[in-house]
Image (cartoon, coloured by chain):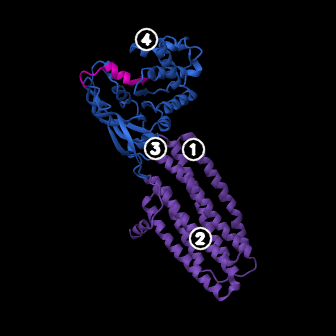
Chain colours: A blue, B purple
């Protein structure tokens, strides 16, 4: 595991913390056919921190997010160049078990998408796939996952009802429990609260704070206030003249939202561009 | 350009800050002039007019709260609104210094001044001039002008020391003059503090533009004095 010292607030009070880079990209390029959707992405995502990716529509935020667990492989004609290091291991190299990569790097989508199965089976689905068979083991995994997803108290008496019977906010927490159940190390969230009301949104945000001690979280959001509220680090993306997505600024969230270095970030976070 | 409404609102608040600033400027010069002329009625008028400064201060503060709640300002916008909030309360305090000088004149009643006022009106004039330029730099976000002004505070400090020394000689020569000397010293002290607060306004201008929030050091003042 790579360990290095980084400066968090270089301008006012310099303090250093020990951090690990959980996910790191080196000169990452993603192509759809001949079109280069992402260009020269170099970013280091720190372990047990929440990193937000922001930027206007079409700048490649979701493409970048989906690269981290090779979900882009599922898009025909896409290919990647450069490196994506998960704990120092390049997930793109031949011989890497992509199913194992996706277990280690889980994903939560914009719209809650529980399976048309019971609450219990939704959460147990992944562990069963990975070979957990004993009922006692499954029961405790389901309970633990639902507890971490802050849903246990609401569903413990109706575990065998359909996951689709829950409210939107509960369904999204069920999806988070499902992602947690396979014991991932990184959780990718693509606009996880975009389809939720403000109360459910805040519950998801609180949940992110609660679980970040166990996981590294990367979230794509269009909601500036959400990025400012929940994340430790923020990455700002934008398309260049060739319509390729580039990361134009990366830093501690407090700096990005109070004193960004790049004029384009300033214009975006203040609502003058986008 | 996006956010036209928000930018108009920011401009309106800045305009209001300039209005409050000009009221404070006028109040400090007039309060010393009334003291110099021993015009108690004028002092009472300026004293009462301070209520209007206070009312406007709360109005600006309220407007800023609404803007923060409804517009969720970020980055430069956030620094502007936070700084206006700070400058707004600085101005109200500076108005209180003028009010304090009026209070001295009123409380002196029929007792004549210990000596004709020369340096005290100079301090008031200098402070008002510094305030005027500091607020202009603030609303125009002119960081260079804002950095030069705090060095001028030393002139006010020098005048204050001069007034202090002079009043001490009166006290030593005639201990019964202590009370009348104290009144003038109190007035001069208010003016010295007034100029200090101008420096705070300049610090906010630097913060808006650079994002750096810190007090001007003596070395910085010296550097900008030479520019």
Q: Secondary structure at mark 2?
A: helix
Residue that appears at 44% across and 21% down: A179
Residue that appears at 34% across and 20% down: A100
Q: Which mark is residue A133?
A: 4
> Callout 1: residue from which chain?
B
Q: Position of residue A138 (x, y in %)?
A: 47, 15
> Callout 4: residue from which chain?
A
Camera-nearest residue between B71 and A120: A120
Q: Residues within 10 Å of mark 2 (few under 14, many from 20)?
A: many
Q: Are marks 1 and 3 in contact (CB under 8 Å)?
A: no
Q: Pick whichever of labels 2 and 1 is earlier in the sequence.
A: 1
Q: CA distance from mark 2 to mark 1?
A: 34 Å
Q: CA distance from mark 1 to mark 3?
A: 20 Å
Q: CA distance from mark 3 to mark 4?
A: 45 Å
* Residue interval drawn in magenta: A93-109
Residue B72 visible in image: yes
Read off the residue under disc 1.
B67
Q: Which mark is residue A254?
A: 3
Q: Secondary structure at mark 4?
A: loop
Q: CA distance from mark 3 to mark 2?
A: 38 Å
Disc 4 or disc 2, which is closer to the eye? 4
Q: CA distance from mark 4 to mark 2?
A: 82 Å
Camera-nearest residue between B6 and A209: A209
> Callout 3: residue from which chain?
A
Disc 4 or disc 1, which is closer to the eye? 4
Q: Pick whichever of labels 3 and 4 is earlier in the sequence.
A: 4
Read off the residue under disc 2.
B191
Residue that appears at 36% across and 25% down: A66
Q: Quadrant of residue A21?
A: top left
Q: Secondary structure at mark 1?
A: helix
């Amino acid at each position: 595991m790579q360990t290095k010292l980084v400066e968090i607030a270089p301008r006012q009070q310099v303090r250093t913390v020990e951090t690990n880079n959980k996910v790191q990209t080196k000169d990452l390029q993603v192509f759809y056919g001949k079109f280069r959707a992402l260009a020269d992405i170099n970013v280091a995502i720190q372990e047990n921190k929440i990193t937000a990716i922001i930027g206007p529509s079409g700048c490649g935020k979701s493409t970048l997010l989906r690269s981290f667990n090779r979900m882009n492989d599922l898009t025909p004609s896409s290919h990647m160049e450069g490196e994506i290091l998960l704990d120092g291991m390049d997930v793109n190299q031949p011989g890497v078990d992509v199913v194992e990569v996706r277990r280690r790097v889980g994903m939560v989508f914009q719209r809650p998408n529980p399976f048309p199965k019971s609450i219990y089976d939704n959460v147990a689905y992944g562990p069963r796939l990975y070979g957990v068979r004993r009922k006692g083991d499954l029961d405790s995994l389901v309970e633990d996952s639902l507890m971490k997803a802050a849903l246990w108290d609401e569903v413990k008496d109706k575990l065998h009802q359909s996951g689709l019977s829950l409210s939107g906010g509960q369904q999204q927490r069920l999806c988070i429990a499902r992602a947690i159940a396979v014991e991932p190390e990184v959780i990718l969230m693509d606009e996880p609260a975009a389809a939720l009301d403000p109360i459910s949104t805040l519950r998801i945000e609180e949940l992110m704070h609660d679980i970040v001690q166990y996981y590294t979280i990367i979230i794509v959001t269009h909601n500036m206030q959400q990025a400012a509220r929940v994340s430790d680090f923020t990455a700002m993306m934008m398309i260049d003249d060739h319509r390729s997505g580039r990361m134009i600024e990366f830093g501690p969230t407090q700096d990005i939202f109070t004193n960004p270095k790049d004029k384009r970030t300033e214009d975006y976070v203040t609502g003058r561009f986008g | 350009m996006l956010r036209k409404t928000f930018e108009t609102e920011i401009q309106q608040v800045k305009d209001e800050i300039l209005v409050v600033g000009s009221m404070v400027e006028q109040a400090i010069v007039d309060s010393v002039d009334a003291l110099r002329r021993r015009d108690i009625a004028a002092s009472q008028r300026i004293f009462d007019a301070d209520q209007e400064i206070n009312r406007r201060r709360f109005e600006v503060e309220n407007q800023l709260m609404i803007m923060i709640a409804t517009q969720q300002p970020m980055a430069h916008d956030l620094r502007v609104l936070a700084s206006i909030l700070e400058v707004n309360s600085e101005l109200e305090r500076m108005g209180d210094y003028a009010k304090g000088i009026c209070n001295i004149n009123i409380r002196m009643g029929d007792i004549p001044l210990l000596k004709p006022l020369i340096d005290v009106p100079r301090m008031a004039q200098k402070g008002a001039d510094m305030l005027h330029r500091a607020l202009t730099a603030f609303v125009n976000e002119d960081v260079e002008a804002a950095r030069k002004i705090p060095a001028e505070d030393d002139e006010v400090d020098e005048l204050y020391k001069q007034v202090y020394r002079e009043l001490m000689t009166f006290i030593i020569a005639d201990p019964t003059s202590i009370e009348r000397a104290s009144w003038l010293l109190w007035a001069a002290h208010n003016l010295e503090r007034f100029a200090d607060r101008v420096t705070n306004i300049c610090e906010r201008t630097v913060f808006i533009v650079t994002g750096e929030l810190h007090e001007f050091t003596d070395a910085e003042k010296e550097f900008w004095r030479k520019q």
